[in-house]
Image (cartoon, rainbow, N blue to C red):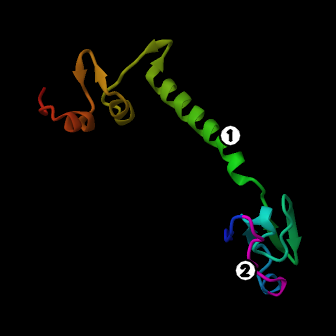
Amino acid sequence: MTTAQVPGKKAPLLVTKEMVDQMKPGTVIVDMAAAQGGNCECTEAGKDVEWNGVTIIGPVNLPATMPVHASELYAKNITALLKLMVKDGELNLNFEDDIIAGACVTHAGEIRNQRVKDALGVAVNS
């Protein structure tokens, strides 16, 4: 994985064609500087290139692709938590379950989460 970049300038060349030629087939290079010319001489911006059995991945604007995946992961986690907490259409707060116990801050007027109690300076038995 290469990431060397200087804002507003061509990315420095770190991996030459000769170096790629010496790599084992199946090697993968992810050139995160592809949009600025790439750190690998074989990089083509926005493309996956195969060079003598080596795959060179040249993503462009990689940060723009992250929100989609982060949102999908967050949605999956929330869905899994809700499936754990709801049984037969009813809220089922099983405080013996570490996930439910850890996710619940308060219930029935009581602070249930130990880290919140510690942060607020609340006695353990209150």
Residue 48 location in percent, x, y?
Answer: 84, 62
Amino acid marked by disc 2: Leu
Q: In front: 35, or 57?
A: 35
Q: Is residue 50 left or right of residue 97?
A: right
Q: Quadrant of residue 58?
A: bottom right
Secondary structure of the residue carrying numbered label 1? helix
Q: Quadrant of the N terminus?
A: bottom right
10 Å crowding of disc 2: few (<14), some (14-19), many (20+):
few
Question: Can you say whether 6 is above or below 61 in the image?
Answer: below
Is 13 a magenta residue?
Answer: yes
Q: Is label 2 or label 1 in front?
A: 2
Secondary structure of the residue carrying numbered label 2? loop
10 Å crowding of disc 1: few (<14), some (14-19), many (20+):
few
- Residue shown at 11% from the left, 32% from the top: 123
Question: Can you say whether 54 is above or below 110 in the image?
Answer: below
Is 9 a magenta residue?
Answer: yes
Q: Quadrant of residue 72?
A: top right
The residue wearing badge 2 is: 14
The residue wearing badge 1 is: 68
- Residue shown at 56% from the left, 36% from the top: 74
Q: Quadrant of the C terminus?
A: top left
Amino acid marked by disc 1: Val
- Residue shown at 85% from the left, 74% from the top: 42
Prevailing secondary structure class for the magenta stretch in the rendered image: loop
Residue 119 location in percent, x, y?
Answer: 23, 38
Q: What residue span does the magenta drawing correspond to?
A: 8-18
Residue 53 location in percent, x, y?
Answer: 85, 75
Cα–Cα span, label 2 and label 1 = 30 Å
- Residue shown at 78% from the left, 73% from the top: 26
